[in-house]
Amino acid sequence: MNQEFLSIVLIIALGYFLKRLNVLQERDGEVIAKIIFKITLPALVLVTFDSVRIETSLMYIPIIVISYGLVTTLFGFLIFRKEERELKGSFLMLTSGFNVGLFAFPLVYAVWGMDGITYFSMFDVGASFITFGIAYILGSYFSQEGLSLKPLGILKKLGKSIPLMTYFIASMLNFNDIQLPEMVISVAGTISEANIPLSLLLLGLYLNFNFEKQFLLPTMKFLTFKYSFGLIFGSILYFTLPYEDMFLYTVLIGLLLPAATSAITFAVEFKYSTNSIRLMANITNTTIFISIIILYVFANFIR
């Protein structure tokens, strides 16, 4: 297990040093991210759902994630109620989403293989609805211009999410015992092999160690809320739900995953200030480090 984690850290470090040496730049990450979300991740989803039988119990995972997103949003309103409007919006966007596709899949594959990918794929279904639904609405509501969205606009955004639509289609095919042609799965399998190294390189490109002191207190407040609430909620479910170990691992670890980087994209779209965007970037980077440590400790000393 230590060997797999070392390989992961080295690939992330490679992405970081390629940026430092100007071989690649952060703006190149936008292209890599598009390749991941529009090509390699959907291919991985198709291969995963084609090769396993999804038990009915797995459908409870996205329900749990969506419920958790709603609960944390309500508590977030209370915890961050005294913050300035735009800062409150930044915190709530980060609170309600998770970085599953880019962060979790490479690490989960190293620990649990394709079985783990299946469970965390179901987690990502719920996380996608939270990220593109709740987080997006909150970001718009607390922007300077205020909420300007309509329900149809949210549905259109969800419909444009290629990973989410792939999850939906692959799930329907799986539940109806319909398999894609062998040639399609073969090609998708080849493409999907690029998902993990590309995701890890992208994490390295976006790493930033220039933490600004002005962001220290708001970052600590956010991290305390995110990880304490996730740990309490996850632990309760872990020790009370009557499901198999992999289901319980997914819920517990999933709720401690990093904040979704898509929140930064939303902040740009809603014209948040540069300070707010820089704060969100610092927070997402910090949550990546914390979540790597959590998953490493869990994989090596707990499970």
Image (cartoon, rainbow, N blue to C red):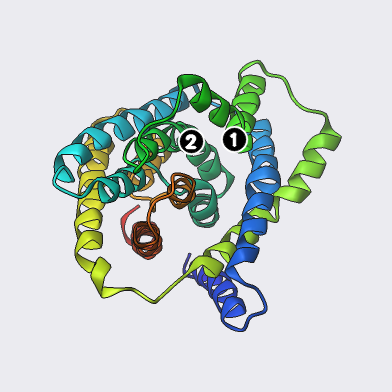
Is residue 11 shown above or below 189? below
Q: Position of residue 53 (x, y in %)?
A: 59, 27
Reading the image, the residue beneath label 1 is: 161
What's the residue at 68%, 43% (across, down)?
Answer: 38
Q: Is residue 259 above or below residue 24?
A: above
**Mark 2: few/some/many CA within 10 Å (<14, 14-19, 20+):** many
Q: Which mark is residue 128?
A: 2
- Residue 203 rendering spot, x and y as whole percentages: 52, 63
User: Residue 227 shows which numbered tag?
Assistant: none
Secondary structure at numbered mark 2: helix
Residue 143 coordinates in the image, percent (x, y):
35, 42
Task: Give the answer, above or below, for where 15 lies relative to 175.
Answer: below
Q: Earlier in the sequence, mark 2 or mark 1?
A: 2
The answer for how far apart the CA atoms under marks 2 and 1 are is 8 Å
How many other residues sit within 10 Å of disc 1, few (<14), some (14-19) or many (≥20)?
Answer: some
Which residue is drawn at the image coordinates 46% and 27% (left, top)? 58
Q: Are marks 2 and 1 in contact (CB under 8 Å)?
A: yes
For the question of whether residue 4 can be seen, the reply is no
Residue in the picture at 35% in, 64% down? 286
**View extreme (front): residue:** 145
Q: Residue at x 37, y 39 (%)?
A: 145
Residue 128 seen: yes
In the image, taking residue 64 as reference, residue 197 lies left or right, namely right
Q: Mark 2 belongs to which amino acid?
A: Ser
**Given the image, on which type of amino acid does mark 1 rest?**
Ser
